[in-house]
Image (cartoon, helix red, strand yellow):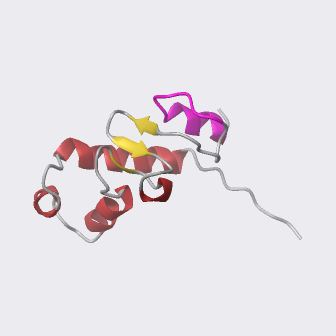
């Protein structure tokens, strides 16, 4: 499966070609990507909580409970969805070696 196909498999809705998001996309009902919200960066659906903010806090050793306290309404499922989204995004990444 190509990186583009893997990326498209992350989406619940049919969105235009890889890398050119023009409308809202929702990942597993929890992660939203909308060019009109936070410049199109992935957020928890219905909020402006960036997936990267959650990942940064997890990387710093914060517990789910501590993160939830900082974001009222956030659930463990939202945090897990952010982790899964990041995992799927990394798996869909393909590196190409550039030669001189």
Answer with the quarter of the image where residue 45 lies: top left
Q: Position of residue 92 (x, y in %)?
A: 57, 44
Of residues 45 and 85, the one nearer the viewer is 45
The residue sitting at 29% across, 60% down in the picture is 54
Q: Position of residue 55 (x, y in %)?
A: 33, 61
Of residues 59 and 27, the one nearer the viewer is 27
Number of marks present in the image shown = 0
- Whether residue 19 sits left or right of residue 70 in the image: it is right
- Residue 15, compared with residue 42, is above or below; it is above
The residue sitting at 47% across, 51% down in the picture is 36
The C terminus sits in image quarter: bottom right
Q: Position of residue 67 (x, y in %)?
A: 17, 61
Q: Is residue 39 magenta?
A: no
Answer with the quarter of the image where residue 16 lies: top right
Q: Residue furthest right?
A: 100
The residue sitting at 55% across, 28% down in the picture is 14
Of residues 67 and 43, the one nearer the viewer is 43
- Whether residue 85 sits left or right of residue 40 in the image: it is left
Q: Position of residue 56 (x, y in %)?
A: 33, 67
The N terminus sits in image quarter: top right
- Whether residue 5 sits left or right of residue 89 in the image: it is right
Q: Which stretch appears magenta? A: 4-16
């Amino acid at each position: 499966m190509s990186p583009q196909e893997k990326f498209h498999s992350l989406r619940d809705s049919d969105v235009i070609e890889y890398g050119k998001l023009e409308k809202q996309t929702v990942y597993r009902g929890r992660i939203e990507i909308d060019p009109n919200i936070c410049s199109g960066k992935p957020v928890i659906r219905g909020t402006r909580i960036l997936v990267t903010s959650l990942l940064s806090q997890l990387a710093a050793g914060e517990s789910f409970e501590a993160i939830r306290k900082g974001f009222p309404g956030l659930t463990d499922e939202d945090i897990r969805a952010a982790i899964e989204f990041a995992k799927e995004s990394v798996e869909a990444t393909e590196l190409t070696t550039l030669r001189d």
